[in-house]
Image (cartoon, grey):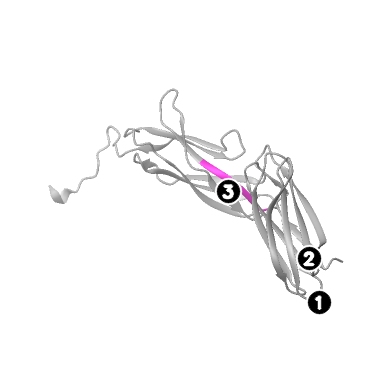
C-alpha cells in the first residue's frame, strides 16, 4: 500500500463536447507522519495530456484530502490522470497514480429528460426578455452538466431565429430541476406580432421543444376587445 494512496477519482462517465467537467481526486496519507505532497491532475485533450492543476502542500497523517479542478470536455473521448508525489527530503517519489476514462456523447440527451416548459410572460415588450421555465430531470446515475438556450422568431417568411444566451444547468442523479431561460426581444419588433420559440440543448442538432405563437409583442389590444376602464374618472 502506497504511503500516499489515491482512493477515488470522481468524474462523469460520459460528457458532451464543450461541457464543463468537475474532476475530484481523493488522496489518503497512510503514513504515521505528515507528508509534503504534490497532487498533479491531468486530462486528455485528444492530442496529449494537459496538466490542469498541481496541488503542493502538507497532508496530515491518516488524513484523506479532496483535490478538485475543472476542464472543458474536448470533441473526442477523454480521460483524467492523477499523480501523487511525496517529498523524501532530497527527491520526489511517485507513490501512486490512477486514471478514469470519459466517453464523448455525440447523440441523444445523455440522461436529460424534458418534463415541462412554461411561458412566464406571454406578453412582452421590445427590449424585454421573453422568459420560460424549463423543468427537467437527470435520468442518469452521474452528475449531469449541460447548457440550454431559448430562441425566438418573429412572424414572416424567411424570418431568422434570435438566439438567447446559453444557460448552464446541473443536477445530481435522478434530480428534477426547474431552470429559467430567456431571450431578449429586439427593439424593432412591432406591437401585435406573434412570436415562436424553441429550446436548444447543447450538443443536439434539433430543438428539444418548440412552439408557435407563444408570445405577443407589445400591449396592442386585439380587434373587438374592449380594454377595462377606470369608471371613477368619467
Residue 170 magenta-highlighted: no
Viewer-closest of 201 and 46: 46
Tag 3 secondary structure: strand
Numbered disc in front, either 3 or 2? 2
In this view, 33 is above or below 222: below
| Residue occupying image coordinates x 57% and y 50% | 169
Q: Residue 136 carries which label?
A: 3
Secondary structure, magenta segment, majority class: strand
State which region is magenta: 143-149
In this view, 136 is above or below 90: above
| Residue occupying image coordinates x 57% and y 45% | 147
Horizontal and vertical percent position of residue 118: 48, 45
Specify few, some or many for label 2: CA neighbours under 10 Å numbering under 14, 14-19, or 20 or more: many
Can you name the residue that lies furthest to the left here? 234
Give the quarter of the figure containing the N terminus: bottom right
Report how far apart the C-alphas of labels 1 and 3 lie in the structure.
48 Å
Q: Quick check: marks 1 and 3 in contact, CB under 8 Å?
A: no
- According to the picture, the residue beneath numbered tag 1 turns out to be 32
| Residue occupying image coordinates x 81% and y 57% | 97
Residue 145 magenta-highlighted: yes
In this view, 80 is above or below 152: below
> Which comes sooner in the sequence, label 1 or label 3?
1
Report how far apart the C-alphas of labels 3 and 2 lie in the structure.
45 Å
Q: Residue 86 carries which label?
A: 2
> Which comes sooner in the sequence, label 2 or label 1?
1
Amino acid at each position: 500500500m502506497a504511503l500516499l494512496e489515491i482512493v477515488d477519482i470522481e468524474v462523469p462517465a460520459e460528457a458532451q463536447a464543450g461541457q464543463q467537467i468537475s474532476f475530484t481526486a481523493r488522496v489518503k496519507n497512510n503514513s504515521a507522519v505528515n507528508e509534503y505532497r504534490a497532487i498533479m491532475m491531468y486530462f486528455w485533450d485528444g492530442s496529449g495530456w494537459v496538466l490542469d492543476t498541481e496541488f503542493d502542500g502538507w497532508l496530515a497523517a491518516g488524513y484523506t484530502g479532496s483535490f478538485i479542478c475543472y476542464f472543458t470536455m474536448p470533441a473526442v473521448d477523454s480521460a483524467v490522470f492523477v499523480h501523487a508525489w511525496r517529498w523524501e527530503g532530497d527527491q520526489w517519489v511517485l507513490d501512486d497514480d490512477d486514471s478514469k476514462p470519459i466517453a464523448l456523447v455525440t447523440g441523444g440527451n445523455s440522461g436529460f429528460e424534458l418534463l415541462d416548459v412554461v411561458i412566464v410572460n406571454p406578453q412582452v415588450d421590445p427590449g424585454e426578455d421573453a422568459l420560460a421555465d424549463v423543468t427537467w430531470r437527470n435520468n442518469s446515475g452521474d452528475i449531469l452538466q449541460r447548457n440550454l438556450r431559448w430562441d425566438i422568431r418573429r412572424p414572416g417568411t424567411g424570418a431568422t431565429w434570435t438566439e438567447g444566451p446559453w444557460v448552464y444547468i446541473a443536477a445530481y442523479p435522478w434530480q428534477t430541476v426547474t431552470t429559467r431561460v430567456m431571450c431578449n426581444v429586439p427593439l424593432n419588433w412591432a406591437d401585435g406580432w406573434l412570436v415562436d420559440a424553441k429550446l436548444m440543448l447543447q450538443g443536439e442538432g434539433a430543438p428539444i421543444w418548440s412552439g408557435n405563437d407563444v408570445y405577443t409583442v407589445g400591449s396592442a389590444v386585439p380587434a373587438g376587445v374592449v380594454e377595462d376602464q377606470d369608471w371613477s374618472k368619467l
